[in-house]
Amino acid sequence: MKKLIKIVIALLFASLVFILLCNFWVVYCTKQYNYFSIKNLPSNDVALVLGTSRNTERGKENLFFKYRMEATARLFKEGKIKYIILSGNNDSEYYNEPLDMQRALLNLGIPENVMTLDYAGFRTFDSVVRCKQVFNQDNFTVISQNFHNARALYIAHNEGINAISFAAQDVPDGYSVRTLIREYLARPKAVLDVHVLRPKADITSNVEIKKKKGPGLTK
């Protein structure tokens, strides 16, 4: 029994060290490519905006979403980007991150014809790989919060993509502790994905799951 406990403790310690090292490595490798100032940000034709839910689980406005959309609109209006790929989760007719992002940006004065919706950005890995493989982009600006950008850039650079990122306004301290914990665990997964696991992203289609029209609503 004592031997088993020692093995469990050793495994837990090793896992903790691996998580910490991966977090350090992902941030260290990407920090020079993540920009906080619009003035210092190099211009790119294309931006990849990483999706998140429009509202929180309690139905309130999600500040991660709000600040990403505001940052995207600012970069476009400042001439730092010309075209926008909105990549997010559309796993059912009731949940459509790309469409929510498009509507928010339209309300912020961004023209519809510069936006392309990626409906199969189920994970950050998928969004980055599909930007290259489906939309033929290997030089773009990622837009998300600072903590998220590091992981996206790490994936991009290891997939042979010349990407930079712009850090949208961060949320107040304590706003979503669960999101930060999830990110600390997602970075080791990203390291494993690009170097070991090599998951397959869907690079064959880009189909929106639309809401079904009820009786009498068809054209």
Image: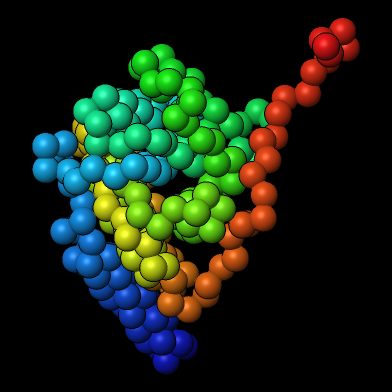
Residue 174 visible in the snapshot: no
The residue furthest top is 216
| Number of marks in picture | 0
Residue 60: x and y in percent read 42, 20
* Foreground residue among 99 and 138: 138
* Foreground residue among 46 and 53: 46
Residue 158, by quadrant, is bottom left
Above or below: residue 10 compared with residue 145: below
Residue at 88% of width from left, 12% of height from top? 215
Residue at 61% of width from left, 31% of height from top? 95
Colouring mode (rainbow / by chain / secondary structure / one colour)? rainbow
Is 17 on the left or on the right of 197, as rendered?
left
Residue 187, by quadrant, is bottom left
Residue 193: x and y in percent read 47, 70
Above or below: residue 106 compared with residue 180: above
The residue furthest bottom is 3
Residue 19: x and y in percent read 32, 69
Is 197 on the left or on the right of 214, as rendered?
left
Residue at 36% of width from left, 17% of height from top? 108
Residue 204: x and y in percent read 67, 55
Image quadrant holding the C terminus, namely top right
Residue 197 visible in the snapshot: yes
Residue at 52% of width from left, 49% of height from top? 135
